[in-house]
Amino acid sequence: MILLGLFLACWLLSLLSFTHILSLAGSLPLALYPYYSVAVALGWAFGMLYMQRTRGFKDPQLRRPFLFIYYLGPPAILVLLRAMAPVAYQRAAPLVPLWAFGVFSILFLVPVTMKFSGGKNTD
């Protein structure tokens, strides 16, 4: 529930920034390489966390709420970080959040789609 609150707060701040109610531009001059590094780290970490949290669930219906939270929540951090970039950075590369979501998605899906043996001997 703590992560859900964090993600909702990030989405809310991003929405307020997008509607120009709250000005965040320029408060964090993050270049593109560190920004994509954050996307990589979030994708990998939350993919692993999703697998860890849903490891014992046999029914796929029980996994869906966790997938919703762990897949659509962390991009809020990416959107918020991009909203905090200087306006010149945002205008120079407007599709960066979309590409970062792609990077996040690929690295989220790596642990989700891999079949782990769970410590059992497969010989």
Image (tube, rainbow, N blue to C red):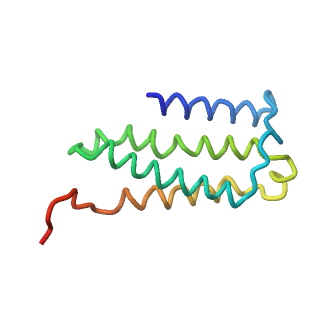
Residue 2, image x and y in percent? 47, 28
* Vertical side of 11 occupied by 110: above or below: below
Q: Is residue 38 left or right of residue 51?
A: right
Image quadrant holding the C terminus, namely bottom left
**Residue 70: image x %, image y %?**
45, 43
Q: At 47% from the left edge and 46% from the top edge, which residue is drawn?
A: 71
Residue 60 occupies which quadrant of the picture?
top left
The N terminus appears in which quarter of the rendering? top left
From this view, report whether residue 119 is shown above or below residue 29. below
Residue sitting at the far right: 88
In the rendered view, tell whether residue 105 sits above or below residue 54: below
Residue drawn at x 75%, y 51% is 30
Q: Nearer the viewer, residue 44 or 100?
A: 44
Look at 64% across and 59% down and name the residue there: 99
Left or right? Give the position of 6 relative to 21.
left
In the figure, residue 103 lies in which quadrant?
bottom right
